[in-house]
Image: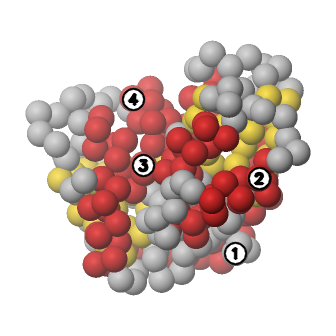
Amino acid sequence: MKIGVFDSGAGGLSVVKSLLASNLFDEVIYYGDTARVPYGPKDKNTIIRYSLEALEFFNNFDIDLLITACNTVSAYALPEMNAQSKYPVVGVIEAGVMALENSIVEKDDTILIIATRATISSKRYQESLEKLNYSHIIALQTGLFVPLVEEGIFEGEILEATMNHYFSNIEPPKAIILGCTHFPLIGDALQKYFDKKPLLIHSGEAIVEYLEAHYKLSIQKNRAELKIFASDNVAGLRKIAKYWLGT
């Protein structure tokens, strides 16, 4: 199976890492819209327009499935993308919710959702969890984490100050939904900040679990071939990929 992965920038590489580790695919085509990252502060119509333009890019490849690794795109643009696509387009929000439901977290445990402004404002995570009777949900816009990760700041004083800014007045959660693909890269720092070491719901791990549950996939003998493209500075994106993925 050949799959595409679309993200607004470099964050979706954290999803690619899980996809490569799964050995379920022959080829992974990654496209980051690095010329227009981040999508989080943008309005719904702009997000949909950019997403449909990305879909046109993937029409140049004979892919079987497209994953929108970007939570913001998953929140706003999936219906429009599927309506114009020749192949299934799958988002990470449903996958993240399924991963939480399959975990040991109880319905009355505190669940923290951290994501960009657009993803939180869409209420996609909150409404999905409420339908499943989760009763204690905290949803926070934590967009400042995105440029920190883009700068390679995964620990230290600046990150700790940013976590204090967002988390100083909230109850320690039992689970944290990482509602942005950048956030797994600060996962260790988040668990350290909350001494009880909450369960982290990671979009990459969740989407692999979701695909295994919904599609007929089989283990491949060889590691998938990864091809990386970007709307700007593809060399920079490939350098990040080499650092994050070790490829």
Q: Residue at the spot x=70%, y=49% of the render? A: 114
The spot of residue 179 in percent (x, y) is 63, 49
Vertical position of residue 160 compared to residue 152: above or below = above
Whole-number angstrom distance, CA of label 3 to CA of label 1: 22 Å
The residue wearing badge 2 is 164
Amino acid residing under circle 4: Glu
Tag 2's secondary structure? helix
Amino acid residing under circle 1: Lys
Whole-number angstrom distance, CA of label 2 to CA of label 4: 37 Å
| In this rendering, the label closer to the viewer, 2 or 4 | 2
The residue wearing badge 4 is 212
| In this rendering, the label closer to the viewer, 1 or 4 | 1
Mark closer to the chain start, 2 or 4: 2
The residue wearing badge 1 is 42
Is the residue marked by circle 4 packed among few (<14), some (14-19), or many (20+) residues within 10 Å?
some
Amino acid residing under circle 3: Val
Amino acid residing under circle 2: Asn
| In this rendering, the label closer to the viewer, 1 or 2 | 2
Q: Which numbered circle lies on residue 174?
A: none
